[in-house]
Image (cartoon, rainbow, N blue to C red):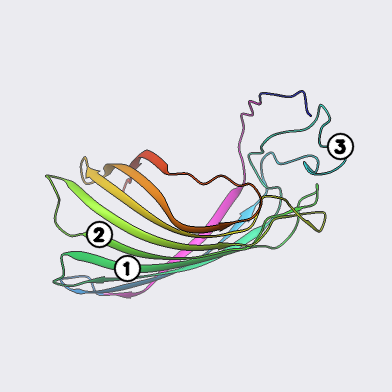
Amino acid sequence: MSNLQDQFDPGYGDLTLGLRRIVLNENFGPGQRLFIDGAVTLPTGKDYSINPFGNTADSIDHTHFALGTGQVSYTLGAEWWVRSEFPFIMGISSKFKSPLTESNAGFSPGTVAGLTFHAIKQSPLIKSIFPYLKIQFRREWPDKWAGEIAPNSGAIFIDMVGQLIYEVNEHSSLVFTIGYPLWQVLEGSQLSSINYALSYRFKSF
């Protein structure tokens, strides 16, 4: 076993550059919006210097995590939203992410494909607090190191995500999120858990 029990790694990870275009926009009242987007992720930060599953994985140089993947990936996505007299704004989004290269250490992350159904309440539950529900379907193909499939990678998920969005003002909001796995197939000994998050969002325009 490695004698490196703790790790603190400040710095920066990968850089993602993307474009997003609205191809259908009905602005006022009931209507639809359709977005398409694409992005490229570039290795600009720290990544694994060695294969953590290789023969030297238990050396003093072994790291438990890395801020970046050290390789180039691309992402494609689309979103379709419908506003009607129904109490919820309904939407569906898709995302596909796949590697273009492997890192210098031989890492290639698995392709990820996802489909999400959205429902956002049009009127607040309580003053300035809006409920947001999502059901996510996600398929993750196994990661590879030097062409070999990495243990504990690859899975199929169906998750339910609930959010409460508190609009502080027109530029900022607080978001409480809880995610619960409805069904999943995990490779190896991956952990299954309920996820909680509290985030702050700010937009300047």
Residue at horizontal 25 percent and vertical 59 percent from the top = 120
For this view, does 3 lie left or right of residue 152? right
Are there few (<14), some (14-19), or many (20+) residues within 10 Å of tag 3? few
At mark 2, the secondary structure is: strand
- x and y percentages locating residue 14 in the rendered image: 62, 46
Q: Which residue is mark 3?
A: 56
Name the mark on residue 91: 1
Q: Label 2 sits on what residue type?
A: Ile
Are there few (<14), some (14-19), or many (20+) residues within 10 Å of tag 2? many
Instruction: Kindly indicate whether the residue at mark 2 contacts the one at mark 1 (C-beta within 8 angstroms).
Output: yes
- x and y percentages locating residue 78 in the rendered image: 44, 70
Q: Is residue 24 magenta?
A: yes
79 or 152, nearer to the observer? 152
C-alpha span from label 1 to label 2 = 9 Å
Q: Is residue 18 magenta?
A: yes
Q: Label 1 sits on what residue type?
A: Gly
Q: Which residues are magenta?
A: 7-25
Q: Label 3 sits on what residue type?
A: Thr
Are there few (<14), some (14-19), or many (20+) residues within 10 Å of tag 1? some
C-alpha span from label 2 to label 3 = 49 Å
C-alpha span from label 1 to label 3 = 47 Å
Residue 141 lies in quadrant = bottom right
Q: Which residue is mark 2?
A: 120
Q: In the image, is residue 150 above or below residue 80?
A: above
